[in-house]
Amino acid sequence: MGDGIKETKAATTVVTAGRRKHWTGGRVVNPPLWRGSTHLYDSVADLRAAKGPVQRNNFFYGRRGGPTHWALAEALTELEPGAEDTYLFPSGVAAISCALLAVLKPGDVLLMTDNAYDPSRSFASAWLKQWGVTTRWFDPMASVDDIIALMEPQPTGGRVAAILLESPGSLTFEVQDVPAICAAAKARGIATLLDNTWATPLFFPALQHGVDLAILAGTKYIGGHSDIMLGSVTTTAEYWTALRRTAYQFGQVISPDDAYLAHRGLHTLDVRLRRHEANALAVARWLNARADIAAVLHPALPNCPGHDVWKRDFSGSSGLFSFVLRHASDDDVATMIDALNLFGIGYSWGGFESLALPVDPAPDRTATSWSADGQLIRLNIGLEDPADLIADLEQALGVLQNRSA
Ligand SMILES: *Cc1c(COP(=O)(O)O)cnc(C)c1O
């Protein structure tokens, strides 16, 4: 694949990514599934030659992966122009924690956006804290100048070594000025990490925007079918060795079956994301026009914090957003969500099927506080017909109105 064509549009790249003849043998479309813990050598001389530093994409032993893994890692790397390579992890959380360990050491300070994914926050406040790393949370809507001020040496001591961004946040959807924050961090030798699960490299190629380590929970849109757990970290050459060494020392490896399914899912990412986008926008705009909805938090809607930055930097919006059910109690939220027929009730997102989830960001805030005129509900908008989703939401909101009438 790719012979003679040097640069393609992302929609083409997702189709060709990781499908060189080297992986497929040129006889089948998808790189075959290789299961293997033991890798075999022709001779002791071959065995001895394979020892030494971790060589990339060489048979050695199953913990270093096999061709099924390498093809997927290469595909994810191809989607991030400027990337050196990608390491695969058994979950998004494993990817986040290992990426942080690769760039931090005891005594360092970590800056983290206050809207970060809850397990990212608790890894910092519990594990990193007892390891000797201090975390300073900052308001996701703070000005770039205020964030830069936090990068400077603080009276409390410790050098800021890394910044973890999540833009938009996956509960409250604030969008950050990632290019400006990363440029300022780079000038100070601070590593930048972005949880890019919402946008994926298709809507936000992170490394091109200045990020050093781009993290995905592949569990969500890369897999896309709600049946695998996966994480990945794609880095620049500068951070690749530290990431690879750390992940290898922690024994991070995924099942080749999951790698196969993720790679299969990846090839339809462009078409799925565009349908998620169109469906979510239809639902979000419909909700936004209702009197019983106090706010819709969707980066493509003008009232979402950071909307202008989203418009400048992103080439699309995906299918996850939240809305505030006006004056609602916990009980109202349960009544409304229980009345939905087409929406599953469950964590996770990014699959082809719609989900609804009551969420409360308030306990997961340090630098800021969360308050809203009602209760927050997060929707994963799937690939159904949007008219059916809207009709389902309408009848469920009707159940609530009839109950309170
Ligand atoms: C789900 C999620 C993760 C974690 O991924 P897992 O595979 O569930 O560990 C990380 N970041 C965001 C934004 C997520 O939504």
Image: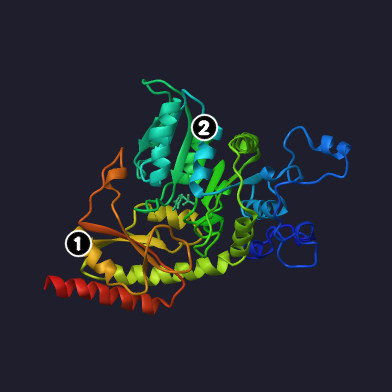
Dot 1 or dot 2: first in sequence order is: 2
Residue at the disc numbered 2: 190
Colouring method of the image: rainbow
Residue 44 on image: x %, y %: 87, 37
Q: Which residue is mark 1?
A: 331
Check the image and report above or below for 344 versus 310: below
252 up-or-down from 228: above or below: above
Q: Where residue 274 sits in the image (x, y, percent)?
A: 51, 68
Residue placed furthest toward the front: 38
Q: Amino acid at mark 2?
A: Ile
Q: Secondary structure at mark 1?
A: helix
- Residue at 47 percent across and 26 percent down: it is 108
What's the residue type where badge 1 is placed? Asp
**Residue 146 can be seen, yes or no:** no
Report the Cα–Cα distance between label 1 and label 2: 45 Å
* Crowd band around label 1 with a 10 angstrom C-alpha radius: few (<14), some (14–19), many (20+): few
Q: Position of residue 151 (x, y in %)?
A: 43, 30
Residue 103 badge: none
The quadrant of the rendering that contains the N terminus is bottom right
Q: Residues within 10 Å of mark 2 (few under 14, many from 20)?
A: many
Q: Position of residue 100 (x, y in %)?
A: 51, 36
Instruction: Please determine whether, in this image, residue 39 is positioned above or below residue 388.
Output: above
Which quarter shows the C terminus?
Answer: bottom left
Q: Considering the numbered disc 2 on the image, is that residue within a helix, a strand or a loop? A: loop
Image quarter of residue 18? bottom right
Compare residues 45 and 198 and report the one nearer the observer.
45
- Residue at 46%, 40% in the rendered image: 164
Identify the image quadrant of residue 45. top right
Left-right relation of 30 to 303: right
Is residue 226 in sight in this rendering? yes
Could you tell whether 368 is left or right of 99 in the image? left
